[in-house]
Image (cartoon, helix red, strand yellow):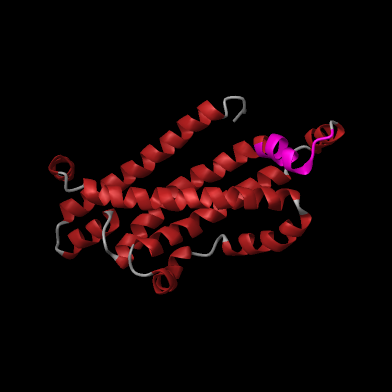
Amino acid sequence: EILVRWVTLVAAGTMLGPLWDTLWRALLGLGMAIVIGVPVGLVMGRNRAAEWFFEPLFSFAFPLPKIALIPLYVHWFGLFSMSKVMLIFTDCLFPIVLFTYHGARGMSPIYLWSAQARGTGPLRMFWRVVLPLSLASIYDGVQVAVVVAVLVAVVTEMVSGGSGLGYMMMRAYRYGDVRTAFATLLTISLIGYVLYRIAQALRARLLFWHVT
């Protein structure tokens, strides 16, 4: 019955609007976290002062449930999409920064010494040595953040409403429409699975040289 309801909702187009709202929020928050988190993690990994300042902050705050910040984010950014996107960004930022940091911190110094011996400057060192050698760890963080982005998008929609799959599921529960609620949950699971598989396929193509 749930599968029949899911097919009906998809065929009627009822699922497409909420699906799009959840997807663009999740991907926008994830993209912002990648753009900011990767440089921060690289600098933390190669600069002692940045590591001393940022590493305790990220390590301490990483296990904290960011969902508890929903009321604060609604107060700061409003009840609509901006608060949801910013919470997704915050939640995705932590795994990306920490995975990138450990990748940049744990690389063999032999590569750095070799580049320095060839007269490589600091900026070129980051671009041509540190970043490529950290890509595997960066991608691990992105794979974790992809799933986190979808989960946080759905939870924020469930709590603060507005639109999206989370709101659709809560509304269905509120009116006793269990089939629609579980059909929506099936869609959420499919989104997370598909995005994770896409990330895995891209990893195999982009990091073909890296042994996993």
Q: Percent from the top left, x then y, of residue 154? A: 34, 56
Task: Please name the residue shown 39% across and 51% down the image.
Answer: 26
Q: Quadrant of residue 158?
A: bottom left
Marker count (numbered): 0
Find the residue positioned furthest to the right.
Answer: 117
In this rendering, the answer to whether 156 lies above or below 75 is above
Q: Main secondary structure of the magenta part?
A: helix
- Asked if residue 206 can be seen in this view, the reply is yes
Task: Please name the residue shown 16% across and 40% down the image.
Answer: 7
Q: Is residue 205 left or right of residue 151?
A: right
In this rendering, the answer to whether 15 lies above or below 203 is below
Screen quadrant of the N terminus? top left
Q: Nearer the viewer, residue 120 or 183?
A: 120
Q: Percent from the top left, x then y, of residue 116? A: 84, 36
Q: Percent from the top left, x then y, of residue 166? A: 29, 57
Magenta extent: 119-131
Q: Quadrant of residue 73?
A: bottom left
Screen quadrant of the C terminus? top right
- Asked if residue 185 can be seen in this view, the reply is no
Q: Percent from the top left, x then y, of residue 117? A: 87, 33
Q: Is residue 65 left or right of residue 17?
A: right
- Is residue 10 shown in magenta? no
Q: Is residue 129 left or right of residue 9?
A: right
Q: Nearer the viewer, residue 90 or 151?
A: 90
Q: Nearer the viewer, residue 2 or 74?
A: 74
- Is residue 123 shown in magenta? yes
Task: Please name the residue shown 45% across and 61% down the image.
Answer: 86
